[in-house]
Image (cartoon, rainbow, N blue to C red):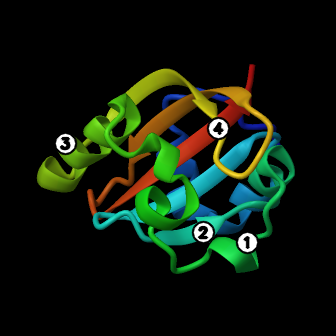
Amino acid sequence: MEIIPFGAKDIDNILQKEPNRAEFLPFGAILLDRNGVILKYNAAEGLIVGRSASDTMAKNFFNDVAPCSKGKRMHSEFLRFARSGQINVMLDYEFDYKMKATRVRIHMKSTPDGQQCWMFIKRL
């Protein structure tokens, strides 16, 4: 199995064909619906922020899991995705909600059908 690098242009297509590969990524991966509800939360993300998938599944990312991001650029980009169904943006952020401040790079990428958004997260 080839390693999918962070920021890969076709990562959305790869994960559409093989959704279980998200668990083997060497960086965090969170799949959100257009309302911001978490549909998938991989183990690597749990290690980055110290939370398990079971603690985050079916919760709203911006209200319940990372309220520190609400009103910031990440949230604004997500709201654009929620309206249009399309996103492919990379940005730097610092998570600090209920954890030690951690600088990360986030790649937000819509799924091919435009109904969901992947957030790929890598520590800086």
Task: Write down the residue under mark 3.
Answer: 80
| Classed neighbour count for the residue bearing mark 4: other residues with Cα under 10 Å, few (<14), some (14–19), many (≥20) | many
Residue 20 appears left or right of 72: right
Three-letter residue code for mark 4: Ile
Q: Position of residue 4 (x, y in %)?
A: 72, 37
Q: Which residue is painted at 79% across and 62% down in the image?
A: 51
Which of the two discs, 4 and 1, labels the residue nearer the N terminus?
A: 1
Q: Quadrant of residue 87?
A: top left
Q: Are marks 2 and 1 in contact (CB under 8 Å)?
A: yes
Q: Position of residue 109 (x, y in %)?
A: 42, 41
For label 4, the SS is strand
Which of the two discs, 3 and 4, labels the residue nearer the N terminus?
A: 3
Residue 48 appears left or right of 74: right
Task: Write down the residue under mark 1.
Answer: 53
Q: Which residue is painted at 50% across and 44% down in the image?
A: 68
The residues tagged by marks 4 and 2 sit, at their Cα atoms, a distance apart of 13 Å
Which of the two discs, 2 and 1, labels the residue nearer the N terminus?
A: 2
Residue 60 appears left or right of 94: left
**Residue 61 position (above or below residue 27):** below
For label 3, the SS is helix
Q: Which residue is painted at 71% across and 76% down in the image?
A: 55
Question: Foreground: 26 or 17?
Answer: 26
Which of the two discs, 3 and 2, labels the residue nearer the N terminus?
A: 2
The residues tagged by marks 2 and 1 sit, at their Cα atoms, a distance apart of 8 Å
The residues tagged by marks 1 and 3 sit, at their Cα atoms, a distance apart of 26 Å
**Residue 104, label in figure:** none
Three-letter residue code for mark 2: Lys
The residues tagged by marks 4 and 1 sit, at their Cα atoms, a distance apart of 15 Å
Question: Foreground: 22 or 3?
Answer: 22
Task: Write down the residue under mark 2.
Answer: 40
For label 2, the SS is strand
Task: Write down the residue under mark 4.
Answer: 121
